[in-house]
Image: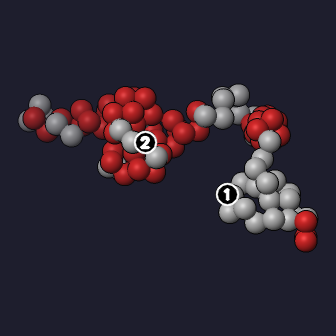
Amino acid sequence: MAGEAYTDNDLIFPNQVGEPLDIRNLTKSYERVLKKANIPYKNFHSMRHTFATRLFEEDVPLKTVQELLGHADISTTANIYTHVMPKQKVKAVDKIDYLFTP
């Protein structure tokens, strides 16, 4: 950090002197991390969708996911941010498989 030049502005991701990050620098850093990890580029915002979807897959209640994302309306979380992955579909069908198994 910048020692005495640093001002604590109660930010989660401040720059070196405590001010808000420049989005261009954040984007460049994000792109470098993806490239270094050999991960195909996805826009930064897609992490919110992944976060919501992974919580949903772990059976975290939708209301909890909504609050973690800060959505005022649960339909935003349900209809835009959570995606049903193939694994979830199989898991759902497996729950009633007993009906069809002798």
Q: Is residue 65 above or below residue 81?
A: below
**Crowd tier of the residue under label 1, counting other residues whose Cα lies within 10 Å: few below 14, some 14–19, many 20 or above:** few
Residue at 18% across / 35% down in the picture? 97
Label 1 sits on what residue type?
Ile
Q: Quadrant of the C terminus?
A: top left
Residue 5 image point, x, y percent: 91, 65
Foreground of the two, 7 or 26: 7
- Asked which secondary structure carries label 2, the reply is loop
Q: Which residue is mark 2?
A: 71
The answer to which quarter of the image holds residue 96 is top left
62 horizontally vs 41: left or right: left
Mark 2: amino acid: His
Residue 47: x and y in percent read 59, 38
Q: Position of residue 98 (x, y in %)?
A: 14, 39
Residue drawn 86% across the image and 57% down it: 16
Please tell me how many numbered marks the rendered image carries: 2
- Element type where label 1 sits in the image: loop
* Side of 64 where 39 appears, left or right: right
Q: Which mark is residue 4?
A: none
Could you tell which of marks 2 and 1 lies nearer the N-terminus?
1
In this orientation, which residue lies closer to the viewer: 49 or 54?
49
Q: Is residue 36 visible?
A: no
Tell which of 78 and 9 is nearer to you.
9
- Check disc 1 and report the residue beneath it: 12
Dots 2 and 1: beta carbons under 8 Å?
no
Q: Is residue 6 above or below residue 99?
A: below
Quarter of the image holding residue 40? top right
Quadrant of the snapshot with the N terminus: bottom right
**Residue 55 % position (x, y):** 43, 47
- Measuring 37% from the left and 51% from the top, which residue is drawn there? 64
